[in-house]
Image (tube, rainbow, N blue to C red):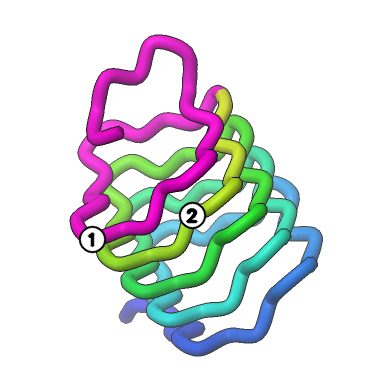
Amino acid sequence: MRRDFSYAEWANRDLFEADLRGVNLTNADLRDANLEGADLTNADLTGASLSGANLRGADLVNADLTNAYLIGADLTGADLAGIKLGGARLGDVKWPDGWTGMR
């Protein structure tokens, strides 16, 4: 069963290396959260607000960020294999070196 944290109010939270594999974070408020090294494999972040979030080294394999807000997010060193970004707001994002996905 998928853990449901939809609409969570986690702005500015320290979620360093959190195990969030497969969780439902739809429409969650994660603005300016520290998600460095977090495992978000297969997580549903549809419509989530991640503006200014630190996602350095995070595992976002097959994560769904459709319509998410990533303005100013830091994805340096993150694993973005299979990530879904349709309709996401992506201004001023720091991408992993060599990443050639949607920009």
Above or below, comparing residue 44 to residue 5 in the picture: above
Q: Which numbered disc covers residue 60?
A: none
| Residue type at the position of mark 2 | Leu
Q: Residue at x 38, y 49 (%)?
A: 41
Which residue is farthest top? Answer: 98
Q: Is residue 54 left or right of residue 39?
A: right
- Alpha carbon separation for disc pair 2 and 1: 11 Å
| Magenta highlight on residue 79 | yes
Which residue is farthest front? Answer: 91
Q: Secondary structure at mark 1?
A: loop
Q: Residue at x 69, y 76 (%)?
A: 10
- According to the picture, the residue beneath numbered tag 2 turns out to be 70
x, y percent for residue 47? 36, 74
Q: Residue at x 44, y 75 (%)?
A: 25
Q: Residue at x 24, y 35 (%)?
A: 102
Number of numbered labels in the structure image = 2
The foreground one among 34 and 21 is: 34
Q: Classify mark 2: residues with Cα within 10 Å, few (<14), some (14-19) or many (20+).
A: many
Q: Secondary structure at mark 2?
A: loop
Mark 2 near mark 1, Cβ–Cβ under 8 Å? no
x, y percent for residue 89? 38, 57
- According to the picture, the residue beneath numbered tag 1 turns out to be 87
x, y percent for residue 32? 72, 60
The stretch in magenta equals: 77-103
Above or below, comparing residue 32 to residue 5 in the picture: above
| Residue type at the position of mark 1 | Gly
Q: Earlier in the sequence, mark 2 or mark 1?
A: 2
Quarter of the figure that contains the N terminus: bottom left
Magenta span dominant secondary structure: loop
